[in-house]
Image (cartoon, rainbow, N blue to C red):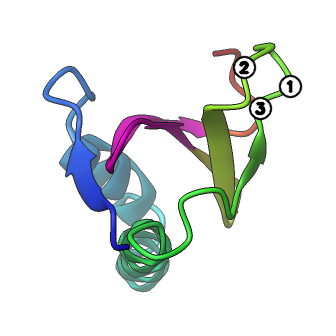
């Protein structure tokens, strides 16, 4: 069964992350964006691929890492919702 992967409408603009990285390197910004998007696509088939988020005691709140970014997502009935993308050094 394939899960539907959706991005939360409350997710801060993903473009802002890319723009910030691009201030130093447009090549690195493109690589980070590409890796994040590719990582989220795998969740359609493997929704529990990421680890449980340590800050939460919830098996359905999980995260993947892409470079130094945490991709936080929630696993629901037949849907995965991407809820946050944070730099690993930032608090949730």
Q: Is residue 84 magenta?
A: yes
Mark 2 or mark 1, which is nearer to you? 2
Q: Which residue is located at x 23 percent, y 44 percent?
A: 7
Q: Mark 2 points at which residue?
A: 58
For this orientation, the residue located farthest to the left is: 9
Foreground: 59 or 65?
Answer: 59
Q: Which residue is located at x 70 percent, y 15 percent?
A: 91
- Residues under labels 3 and 1: Cα distance? 14 Å
Mark 2 or mark 3, which is nearer to you? 2
Q: In this view, does 54 lie above or below 47?
A: above
Q: Which mark is residue 41?
A: none
Mark 3 or mark 1, which is nearer to you? 1
Q: Mark 1 points at which residue?
A: 54
Specify which label sits upstream in the sequence, 2 or 3: 2
Left or right of 4 on screen, residue 28: right
Q: Is residue 45 magenta?
A: no
Specify which label sits upstream in the sequence, 3 or 1: 1
Q: Mark 3 points at which residue?
A: 89
């Amino acid at each position: 069964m394939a899960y539907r992967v959706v991005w939360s409408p409350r997710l801060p603009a993903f473009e802002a992350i890319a723009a910030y990285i691009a201030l130093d390197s447009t090549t690195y910004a493109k690589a980070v964006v590409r890796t994040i998007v590719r990582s989220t696509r795998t969740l359609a088939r493997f929704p529990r691929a990421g680890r449980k988020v340590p800050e939460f005691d919830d098996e359905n709140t999980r995260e993947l890492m892409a470079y130094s970014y945490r991709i936080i997502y929630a696993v629901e009935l037949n849907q995965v919702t991407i809820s946050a993308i944070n730099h690993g050094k930032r608090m949730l």
